[in-house]
Image (tube, rainbow, N blue to C red):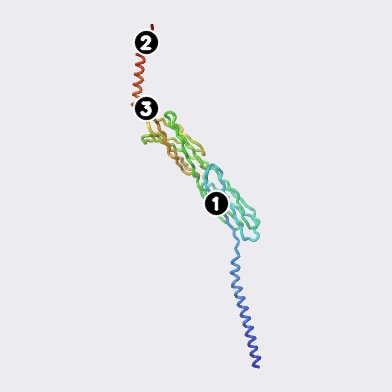
Amino acid sequence: MGAEMNELTRTGSRTLKGVLLAGSACVALFAAAPVAWSQVPPASFGTTTAAVVPLTGQTTVFLSDQAILSNFTNPTGTVNFILNGPPGTVGTSFQTVNGNGTYPSGNFLLPNSGPVAGQYTWTVTFGTLVATEATMVSAANPNLTTTTSLVGLTLTDSATLSLGYFPTGNIVFTLVGPDGVVDATDTVTVNGNATYTTPSGFTADLLGTYTWNAMYLPNGDPNNVQVSAMPESVTVGSSVPEPSTWAMMLIGFAGLGFAFRQSRRRVSFA
């Protein structure tokens, strides 16, 4: 009887150990399951576009965006793009979705007049999902170079404006004389990248070096920044006589005329 009881006790102990081991394995399995599930990446919807786009040259400028779908289960439908900026709504487009991947917006053409530089916002939707992204369009940095001219005593200047984005505004020419005084100021209206010349010029009245300064002023054109040309000088030499020189020349001419008349009186004919 005692031996039977001992055997029963050993059997029960082995059974209890088995139950406890099985329970521990189940607890471990369920504890590990959330960790394993959290490692599965969720579905993702986003966009990517250029952060900054400069306006440069008298050329067309496009903006574009693209939507990226990943880890969806057989996604279908459409991705819709809307671009808004300083001009208002620039354009809209859509792409048909057929699975995960990258979907481009296409190229949106910016206007060539009115306010163009500034911040643009993309609004991209896929079903109930919405993504927004900004692009900054920076103003153009034009280049301004000058060429001076001296014809006789007339001083003129020409300025070539380039790399502007359909620029408007004015170019102001200023001429500083040898005495440091501003002798002339000319203003011309800008209508695009081109060469602009002082409309009247200035007649030099002093000997020495004159300096032309030219500046492009956008005057409310947000698409271009102000720029100045390097000062350029031209020297007026002895071709401009001083007042005392003029007097000596007149006296000389008078003397020559008197001598010529006297010589004619001495001439005799046989």
When the figure is inspected, residue 128 is found, relative to residue 158, above or below; the finding is below
Which mark is in front, 1 or 2?
Answer: 2
Closer to the chain start, of discs 3 and 2, is 3
Which mark is in front, 3 or 1?
Answer: 3
Q: Which amino acid lies under the numbered mark 1 shown in the image of this protein? A: Ala
Residue 181 position, x and y percent, is: 37, 35
Q: Which residue is mark 2?
A: 267
Task: Give the residue drawn at x 34%, y 23%.
Answer: 248
Q: Residue 160 — which label?
A: none
Q: Nearer the viewer, residue 47 or 18?
A: 18
Quadrant for the N terminus in the image: bottom right
Tag 2's secondary structure?
loop
Quadrant assignment, res 149? top left
- Residue 132 lies left or right of residue 227; in this view the side is right
Quadrant assignment, res 48? bottom right
Task: Give the residue drawn at x 60%, y 61%.
Answer: 43
Q: How many marks?
A: 3
Label 3 and label 2: CA atoms lie apart by: 37 Å
Crowd rating for badge 2 (residues with CA inside 10 Å; few <14, some 14–19, many 20+)? few
Which mark is in front, 3 or 2?
Answer: 2
Q: Which residue is mark 3?
A: 241
Q: Which amino acid lies under the numbered mark 2 shown in the image of this protein? A: Val
Q: Which residue is mark 1?
A: 50
